[in-house]
Amino acid sequence: MKPVVLFPYHDPEEVCQPHLERIIPELKNLFAGAFLGVDLPTYKKQADFIDNLSKDPFFRICFSQPGSTFGDHCLVACERAVMDCAQDQVLHFCFIDRLAYALQCEYRKEFIADIQKTAAENSPLLFQRSYEAWQTHPSNYQAIERMAILSSDLLLKRALDLTWCHLALTIRQLESIVPLLKRRDLVMLGEMVLLLLDLLSTKEVDWLAWEDPFILGRDPQELKVERENSIGETRKRLAYVIPTLALLYEKNGDTDQPPVIKI
């Protein structure tokens, strides 16, 4: 049985839209269906494109409410997937820019093989950035996001990417954690990992290399230097990594935290 794919679709600048349009045939070859959590600003900019997607039974378009946040975009798609799919269906929760890059870059074959090998028996599976993948990212991205990985290693004795980019799990596992998710920002990603902790396996992959130069059509080295010198980019990452560290700290010492899922 082919897996399904789910991703929030926040793209009011229409940066990812041409990439999504380009990879539709690849998505249909690889997945049984796609669940998209779409926000209002994106729909206003891409109404014709999104309406056309909604006419295709492969795509399940799920609209979040006005003023919704990242977590809301994700959760409307999660709730639809739980309603539409069998309990043992494998779902790949990821992000459109990473997905578009993986299907069009030099690691395409490795990415496809990893998707095809993912099954209910080895889920949940957290795909993590390999050393080679991390080296492609700007140094400030690495320094800040890897603080969460190091802290996970120190507190949980497992080096887990709490600000992950790609997670495979079954619908049953997804359904079990959705009611327990409290955050509606990027910290929700760390919540998901901690709730699945006892079941979770990991795999380091090169195809999670930095996607932005490809998506934006920029020179990788030039963009890397630009981002490394940007206080705004540094603050942007601190804004979700600091509360992720707080979440990890609380989880490690607070017995009132939600239980770890064991099904």
Image (tube, rainbow, N blue to C red):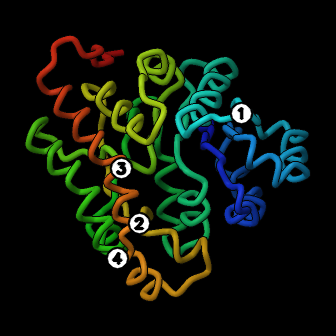
- The residue sitting at 62% across, 34% down in the picture is 68
Three-letter amino acid code of the residue under disc 4: Glu
Could you tell me how far apart the alpha carbons at marks 4 and 3 are, in whole angstroms?
16 Å
Is residue 211 found left or right of 47 in the rendered image? Answer: left
Q: Which mark sits nearer the N-terminus, 4 or 1? A: 1
Residue at label 2? Answer: 232
Instruction: Give the class, few, some or many, for how many residues have Cα within 10 Å of label 2's Cα (few <14, many ≥20).
Output: few
Could you tell me how far apart the alpha carbons at marks 3 and 2 are, in whole angstroms?
10 Å
Whether tag 2 and tag 4 are in contact, CB under 8 A, the answer is no
Q: Position of residue 115 (x, y in %)?
A: 51, 49
Could you tell me how far apart the alpha carbons at marks 4 and 1 are, in whole angstroms?
33 Å
Q: Indicate the secondary structure of the residue bearing disc 2.
A: helix
Which dot marks residue 66?
1
Does the rendering let one see residue 160? yes
Instruction: Give the class, few, some or many, for how many residues have Cα within 10 Å of label 3's Cα (few <14, many ≥20).
Output: few
Residue at label 3? Answer: 239
Give the number of the mark in front: 4 or 1. Answer: 1
> Looking at the rendering, which quadrant does residue 84 occupy?
top right
Whether tag 1 and tag 3 are in contact, CB under 8 A, the answer is no
